[in-house]
Amino acid sequence: MNPRAASDMARLRVRRRLLQSAGALAVITCVPARAADSGLPALPALTAFLAGRTPRRERISLDLPRIADNGLSVPMRVSVSGPFAPGPFVRKLALFSEINPVPDMAVFEFPQPLERIEIDTRIRLAGTQQIVAIAEVTDGSLLAAAAEVIVTLGGCMDGT
């Protein structure tokens, strides 16, 4: 191979690496920032509910469609698997939204222990955002799940 061809090949490899690095950098800067500790969005209502406690991402499932055509009625299912130990059980389940006008969407309280918790409902979403479910157990621990929904037509135009 002549020296000029070798030089061209080396230049192409450098150029290819530069383009790959630039592409990776562009993707990284486009990803939205999340709270570093738990991977949950930084919301004042959520921070107040957590009160300095760190939730564990286990035993709770939050099922939402990946893409919602209409934010006025988005189906959602929240479930917490059981059975729980004889002592601690889920006392409270709270739902938070990232950009809705009212970020604390709902709080469900369970005064008696249940083997399994399943909630099927529909929610309104103002736009593309992350929904967070936090379950508070009677021993003070927290369980968490989060899901991102892409909303093509927002449903909270009137501020509710």
Image: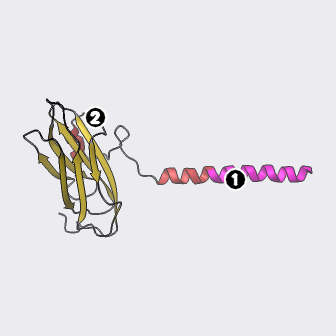
Residue 16, x across and y down, in percent: 70, 53
Q: Quadrant of residue 53?
A: top left
Amino acid type, mark 2: Thr
Of 28 and 89, which appears nearest the observer? 89
Of 55 and 19, which appears nearest the observer? 55
Q: Residue at x 32, y 57 (%)?
A: 129
What range of the chain is rendered magenta?
A: 2-20
Task: Judge from the rendering whether residue 71 lies leftward or rightward of residue 13; answer left or right.
Answer: left
Magenta part, dominant SS: helix
Labels 1 & 2 near each other (Cβ < 8 A):
no
Amino acid type, mark 1: Arg
Mark 1, residue position = 16
Mark 2, residue position = 54
Q: Quadrant of residue 88?
A: top left
Q: Residue at x 28, y 47 (%)?
A: 61
How many marks overall? Answer: 2
